[in-house]
Image (cartoon, grey):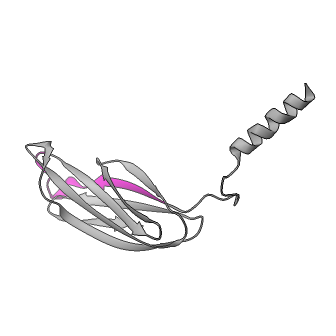
Amino acid sequence: MRTVVVFLVALLVASCADPSGGGTPGPRIEVRTEFDDSGGVYIEGFLSYVRVRGPGIDEEIELEVPESASFELEGGGTYVMTSWVRSCAGNCGFLDPPSDRCEDMFAVGEGATLRVLITYRAGTPCEIEG
C-alpha cells in the first residue's frame, strides 16, 4: 500500500511541474480591447484583429470588442503588435476591407507579462497602450 501512495504522490507532483523545468512561466502578452463610441459607431458592427510578430511567433486572432486574449511567447525579445478592424457590410458574414489600423513595438522580458489595451474608434486609427 505504501508503494502505491508514494507512486501516486510522485505522479501528482510530476503532473504539476513546469515541463520546461525552469519553474517560471514563459513570457506572454495579454490583450484587452475596448470601443470608444464618442466619435460615432460602425453602423452594422465590426470585428477586430490583432497580430503579434516576433521571435518564434507570427499569430493573428479575431476578437469581438470588448474581449480579451493572450499570446504565449517562446522567449523574451522585441515584438510588433498590429491591429485593425473590418466593419460589417450588411451583417458580419460579409466584411469591409481592413481599416483603422495601428501598430506598436514592445520589448518583453523573459518570464514577463505585458498587458496591452487596444482602443478602437470609428473612422480613426486604433490606439495600442502597453
The spot of residue 30 in percent (x, y) is: 45, 57
Q: Is residue 6 left or right of residue 61?
A: right
Q: In this orientation, does residue 125 appear?
A: no
The residue closer to the viewer here, 117 or 110, is 110
Up-down: is 31 above or below 4?
Answer: below
Up-down: is 108 above or below 72?
Answer: below
The spot of residue 9 in percent (x, y) is: 81, 36
Q: Quadrant of residue 60?
A: bottom left
Please state the total of marks drawn on the protein image.
Answer: 0
The residue closer to the viewer here, 94 or 42, is 94
The residue under the point 41% across, 57% down is 31
The residue closer to the viewer here, 53 or 118, is 53
Q: Quadrant of residue 39?
A: bottom left
Q: Is residue 5 left or right of residue 109?
A: right
Q: Is residue 41 magenta?
A: yes
Residue range (magenta): 29-44
